[in-house]
Amino acid sequence: MIEIIVLLLIIFFLFLAYKNKAAKDYIVNVFRRNNVIVYGKKGSGKDLLFQMVINRRKELHYSNINFGKNTMNINVSELSLFPNTFENVIDNNIEKVFPNLKEHIDIYISDAGVILPSHYDYKLDKKYPSLAIFYALQRHLYQSNTHVNTQALTRVYKKIREQGDGYIKCLRAIFIGPIYIQQCIYYDRYESAEQSLLPMDKPLLNNPNTALYNQYVATNGIIKPLMFLGFTKNIKYNTRYFKNVFFKEPMVQVDVK
C-alpha cells in the first residue's frame, strides 16, 4: 500500500514539474517572439515575471533596473532614432544614424506607467519623438524586442501599448517559504487585454462546444491562463528599487505604539 502511495506521489510531482516547465516555456517563447506588455496590480508579480523570463533565457539584456549579472543598464532615452520623426518617414526624408545598441539583446523596462505615463502622452511625443518608430521597427533594427510592465495597461504611453504584440496580466504572486506561485493570463490582442477577458477552457475535439471555443478565439484572440512555481532565491532585483532613486537620506524609522 505504501509503495502505491509513494508511486502516486512521484507521478503527481512529475506531472506538476511538467506543467510548471510547460507554462514557463510558453511565457519565455512569448517574450522571444514579441514586444510584451505586462500589467497587474501592486504586488501581483510583474517584475517577478520579468525575473523568471530573464533567468530562463540566460542571456544579456538591457533594463532600467538590475535583474542580475546579465543586466546592462539602459535609459528610455536610448530607445531612439533621433532626429528622425514620423514626418521624416512620411516624407521619405530619413537621416541615417549610428546604432547605439547591440543586436539580439532584449530590453526590459520596469514601471513604465511611471517612466512613460499615458497622461503625459503629449509631452512624451515631444520628449521622445522617435520612440514609437524605434518600438515598431526594433525587430528590423536590432533583431530584438522591448518589454515593459505597468500597474494598469492604460497607464503606459499610448504609442507603446497599442503597438505591443503580446499582453500578460499578472493576477497574483503567493510566497510560501522558499517558493512562490504565480498566476497570470496571456492575451495576443490588445482589446481583449484591455477588457481583461477571461479565458474559455478548451474542450475536447469531439465535444460539441468545440465550435463555440473556436468562435471565441476567432473573436477575442488567444487568451491563455498560466500558473507556475519558482524559487525566491532566484530573485535578484531590488524589490524597493525606487526607494534609492527618490530618497536622499535613509528613511526615518517611526515607532508605532
Image (cartoon, helix red, strand yellow):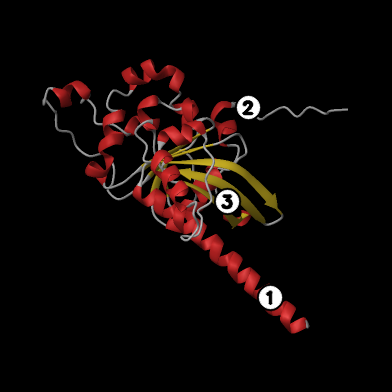
Q: Position of residue 144 (x, y in %)?
A: 31, 46
Disc 1: which residue: 8
Disc 3: which residue: 235
Disc 2: which residue: 249
Tell me the residue at 46%/47% (across/down): 212
The alpha-carbon separation of the residues under discs 1 and 2 comes to 56 Å
**Which label lies toward us, 1 or 2?**
1
Q: Which amino acid does label 3 sit on?
A: Ile
For label 2, count other residues whose C-alpha is less than 10 Å away and answer few (under 14), some (14-19) or many (20+). few
Asked if 219 appears above or below 59 in the picture, the reply is above
- Closest to the observer, 77 or 137: 137
Quadrant where the C terminus is found in the figure: top right
185 horizontally vs 86: left or right: right
Tell me the residue at 19%/37% (across/down): 98
Tell me the residue at 63%/52% (across/down): 181
- Closest to the observer, 31 or 203: 203
Q: What residue type is labelled 1?
A: Leu
